[in-house]
Image (cartoon, helix red, strand yellow):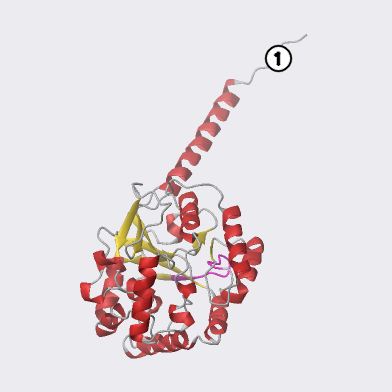
Amino acid sequence: MGKKKLLSPCVLRLLICLFILLLGSLVVHTLYKRTTPFPIDLVYLWVDGEDPSWLAKKTYWQKKYGIYNEYVAGPSRYRDRNELKYSLRSTEKYLPWVRTIFIVTDHQIPKWLNVNHPKIRIIDHTDIFPKDALPVFNSSAIETRVPFIPGLAEHFLYTNDDVFVNKPLTWDFFFTKEGLPIHYDDVRITKELEQLLNFPGNEIPKANYQFSMDILKNVYKIDFEKAPTYSGTHTITAYRKSDFLDNLRILGDHITRTTYSKFRDAKDITRGIFVIPDNLKGKNVIKSALNIPGKCGVAGKLIMKNMTALKTENPCMFCLNDAPSLTNADLEAHSAYLQKRFPNKSSFEL
């Protein structure tokens, strides 16, 4: 039998060079996924609405203020279905480059949470609020205090516990290389928002939406015919702390009023209105989200549509939020889906 032909030295060197290039690109890609050019933190708001001591406190202040609107202070707004656990699983899997995860709570800590994890920091309301503003049961009020979180990075992401990352995202999905926040506008969400605002009993959110438009027009002097469009969605949103603080200063008394608003109110300032004036000042970038949707559907009666859409749209992020119209069957389907989608325990859990 003839001798086997060996690879020539030139071909062998070429193969070795190709292997080194491939290995190098994999290393660079991995580092790119796990490192950022500046620190980026993540902020969650979380509450356990069935905690007896918290619930007694909320009930007392509801009676004192006469607040009974389901969309403003009903159980669904504070219900905990372990969403935070699954959201953190998605964060660890798909956003490994996040530096510190701040969880803002009211004297509460999830029983399953590993508070000793080096990335986790619990922030109590007493750490960021004026003493005479507490207690507070209003997420809009809490948002006005987010930039006062001790140790929060200049560049941070803000979200709620019902938002989940669905695929790997690098830091430049949220920020430009110059550090400007990137926001994604989706015209479909605008239509869904209009439907949501017209739900029976949703008068306060509807009035708040109109109030926000008035603030943009009268305080920021926005000309809507020349301004960019932006639909604030239930997703992960990028901010710079200095820009956030500038908006708080500009809005002055409106922000103070919101900070002291114990329950949602028609005249609360919501963080979503900062995006348009910041964009006109060159402080952020607004992109179309038509090809990279941040959310599937809306809450309430459309929750099953949300879960069906997740299979067909495969969005980069999605939200499965709560609403008074959800049945026990809806909630069970929701929990089952999250367990199936994110079955593996994260290092943030005990």
Q: Position of residue 54 (x, y in %)?
A: 36, 68
Q: Quadrant of the N terminus?
A: top right
Q: Position of residue 14 (x, y in %)?
A: 56, 29
The residue singled out by tag 1 in the image is 4
Picture layout, residue 328 above or below residue 67 = above
Q: Position of residue 295 (x, y in %)?
A: 54, 68
Left or right, residue 124 beside residue 46: left
Q: Is residue 249 visible?
A: yes
For the point 47% across and 47% down, the residue is 346
Q: Quadrant of residue 130?
A: bottom left
Left or right, residue 60 beside residue 1: left
Q: Quadrant of residue 246?
A: bottom left
Crowd rating for badge 1 (residues with CA inside 10 Å; few <14, some 14–19, many 20+): few
Q: Quadrant of residue 297?
A: bottom right
Q: Quick check: is 293 in the magenta stretch?
A: yes
Q: Residue furthest right?
A: 1
Left or right, residue 184 beside residue 247: right
Q: Residue furthest top?
A: 1
Please identify the dominant SS of the magenta region.
Answer: loop
Left or right, residue 6 beside residue 87: right
Q: Is residue 274 visible?
A: no
Q: Nearer the viewer, residue 324 or 178?
A: 324
Q: Range of the magenta residues?
A: 286-295
Picture layout, residue 342 above or below residue 14 = below
Q: Quick check: is 64 in the magenta stretch?
A: no
Q: Position of residue 324 (x, y in %)?
A: 54, 77
For the point 42% across and 49% down, the residue is 348
Picture layout, residue 235 above or below residue 204 = above
